[in-house]
Image: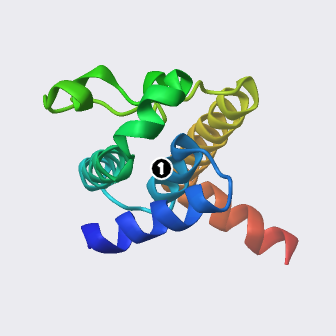
Amino acid sequence: MKEDILEGLKSATSKGESLEQAMQSFYNAGYKKEEIEEAARDLQKHQFENQKPVEQDKSPKENKQIPKQIKSGKTIQKVSNYEQTTKKPKRKIMIFLLVAALLILLGVLTGIFLFKEELAGLFNKLF
């Protein structure tokens, strides 16, 4: 499973998508956060190991993009904050409306249960 995620991350980053966007896509697709982050760490380590020492001396900007934890050989606890999304106000309104509708329906159901005899008599008169 991790290999599939790793290949997907490689493919996405090779097409110009950022690592964070690719990770978010896998997270939204239902993959486990831990597996995604582990694959991202492996990808970053692989990219770091494949850089030539001559290139590292010539391009200090590329070295800054690789986390210091990888350079020093330490493990990374968190690759990015892709999981931290803010709830939109529309979502809160929708939740409120759904809860209100549920409470109203429960009230109607309770009323029907409590007054079933009266309602049955009313429907018999009407029909």
Residue at the front extreme of this rendering: 54
Q: Is residue 40 left or right of residue 109?
A: left
Q: Amino acid at mark 1?
A: Met
Which scheme is used to colour this image of the protein? rainbow
Q: Position of residue 42 (x, y in %)?
A: 27, 52
Residue 114 visible (yes or no): no
Q: Is residue 90 above or below residue 101?
A: above
Quadrant for the N terminus, please: bottom left
Q: Secondary structure at mark 1?
A: helix
Q: Is residue 90 above or below residue 25?
A: above
Q: Quadrant of the C terminus?
A: bottom right
Total marks shown come to 1
- Disc 1 residue crowd, few under 14, some 14–19, many 20+, Cα 10 Å: many
**Residue at 14% of width from left, 31% of height from top?**
73
Q: Position of residue 11 (x, y in %)?
A: 54, 67
Q: Is residue 38 visible?
A: yes
* Depth order, front residue of 90/34: 34
Q: Residue at x 76, y 31 (%)?
A: 90
What is the residue that sits farthest to the bottom in this orientation? 127
The picture places residue 94, in percent across and down from the top left corner, at 70, 37
Residue 93 at x, y percent in the picture: 72, 28
> Which of the two residues, 125 or 79, is positioned nearer the viewer here?
79
Report the residue marked by disc 1: 23
**Which residue is drawn at the image coordinates 47% and 59% (left, top)?**
26
**For residue 98, which quarter of the picture?**
top right
Q: Residue furthest left?
A: 74
The one of 23 and 62 positioned closer to us in this rendering? 62
